[in-house]
Image (cartoon, helix red, strand yellow):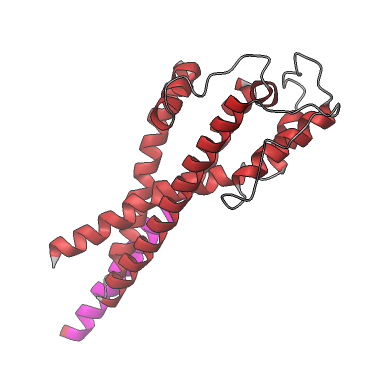
Amino acid sequence: MKIVRLLLHMLIAAAAPLILVIGMARLLTLPWYPAWEYAKANFPADPLGMAPAERLRLARASIAFLNMPRGVGRLDDLQFADGTVAFNVREISHMDDVKLVYDQLTAAALIAFVVAVVAAWVLIRQGRLALVWGALSDGSLFTLCVLMLLGVWMAVGFDAFFTAFHGIFFAADTWLFNYSDTLIRLFPLQFWADAGLIIAVGVGALAFVLALLTRALQKRNERTQEAGIMNHES
């Protein structure tokens, strides 16, 4: 039984970082983020002079594509104000790859959530609520440790981190574009650097609070159980 409890504990703990990171990342695929980013005074203007309103429209459409059911959303019919197509074939192919990875990570996070809920339910049925709180706390602390390592990496060299990240999920060179390509004009490096910072800070804050809260709940539950055993023995 101890091995089973350990396995359930690990399943819950492992689910925490994936759920926190993907959940925070999905918040940035809502319309507010490009609008907020473009409104910043230090955000680079389009080098080819695209109007801000048109730039925001295309950015929002590109990001909305990620949240559409597969086969429903299309990017090849997006156009500039003058009627020319916004994206070339290579850009559309990359966005299809991005959506595939995005959908797979979302599915993985949902599966992790379901597995964690089932594992928690089994432990609670066994009267091991304290183990559930402890697993959540351990998962949150693990998330903080990973974030610290990634944060140092990004601080030392974001370009290297950005390249390595794309190398994991995409085929070689399929994510590299000319500065004149629409994807680069809509989403310059600062867009992604700011997104990474928001995700790191947001996940870090949530993980820190969750670690403290669940550890406190774990200690409280353990004291309650000990008090119950002592009362039963007396």
Residue, x 73% and y 20% (percent of image)?
Answer: 42
Where is residue 172? Give x, y as percent.
42, 21
Q: Is residue 39 visible?
A: no
196, 65: nearer the viewer: 65
Residue, x 85% and y 29% (percent of image)?
Answer: 81
Whether 201 is drawn above or below 193: the answer is: below
Residue, x 53% and y 19% (percent of image)?
Answer: 176
The quadrant the N terminus occupies is: bottom left
Q: What's drawn in magenta, residue-wise?
A: 208-232
232, 2: nearer the viewer: 2
Displayed quadrant of residue 186: top right
Displayed quadrant of residue 193: top right
Residue, x 63% and y 27% (percent of image)?
Answer: 191
By secondary structure, the bulk of the magenta-drawn segment is best described as helix
Whether 162 is drawn above or below 96: the answer is: above
Whether 10 is drawn above or below 122: the answer is: above
> Number of marks in the image?
0
Q: On the picture, is 224 further left or further right than 167? A: left
The quadrant the C terminus occupies is: bottom left
Where is residue 154? Give x, y as percent.
47, 23
Q: On the picture, is 172 further left or further right than 205? A: left
Q: Is residue 209 magenta?
A: yes
Where is residue 103? Give x, y as percent.
50, 47
Displayed quadrant of residue 120: bottom left
Where is residue 133? Give x, y as percent.
35, 61
7, 2: nearer the viewer: 7
109, 89: nearer the viewer: 89
Q: Is residue 165 magenta?
A: no
Q: Is residue 163 visible?
A: yes
Whether 122 is drawn above or below 196: the answer is: below
Q: On the picture, is 232 further left or further right than 77? A: left
